[in-house]
Amino acid sequence: MTLDTFSIRLAAQADYPAVVACIEAAFTKWIPIIGMKPVALTADYHDFIARKVIYVVDGHQSGELAGLLIIYVVDNALYVDTIAVNPAYQKHGIGRQLLGFVEQKTREAGLHKITLVTNAKQISNQEYYRKNGFIETHRTELEPGRIGVWMAKTLAAE
């Protein structure tokens, strides 16, 4: 499997079951680590699809997603609400491809900053984002027992 075998496209309502399956596959493992369901497991994906903010990476089998991305503008930055890679497709560069797509969309929108939040207990996610140029900006309690680590990446002007 090579990186160039995957393309990113805007999700359609017909993708809803595959979106939910990809989210469940990617995020269920975090429940015992963070002690509760990740926010991604409780989101309204019909709404995100209707708002045209979900981009998907098709898998090799019909109806299967290799990954997905939810992005929209918040406070003059492109906010990464969710990035998920189906475990069956991890370690094949899809996450990097999705982050590259985020950078492209950020520039297309005339923005220079990307922001995201991850759970403080999701250490490997924080490390991954740091490795990809993000820095921690602050931490907040999103709700009782859920500490968010806010991260940002500023893109160089082109």
Image: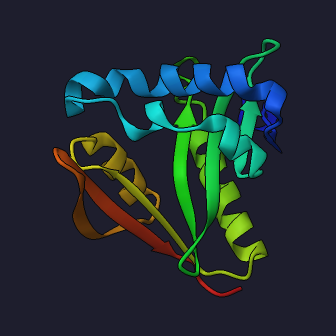
Report the side of 142 relative to 45 (left or right): left
Q: Residue at x 53, y 79 (%)?
A: 75
Q: Position of residue 145 (x, y in %)?
A: 16, 44
Q: Residue at x 73, y 34 (%)?
A: 57
Q: Position of residue 112 (x, y in %)?
A: 60, 81
Q: Residue furthest bottom?
A: 157
Report the side of 132 relative to 12 (left or right): left
Picture quarter with the N terminus:
top right
Q: Quadrant of residue 99?
A: bottom right
Q: Nearer the viewer, residue 69 or 40?
A: 40
Q: Nearer the viewer, residue 72 or 134?
A: 72
On screen, residue 17 above or below 118: above
Q: Residue at x 43, y 70 (%)?
A: 152
The answer, for residue 62, to whether it is visible in the render is: yes
Report the side of 9 relative to 41 (left or right): right
The answer, for residue 1, to whether it is visible in the render is: no
Report the side of 28 relative to 21 (left or right): left
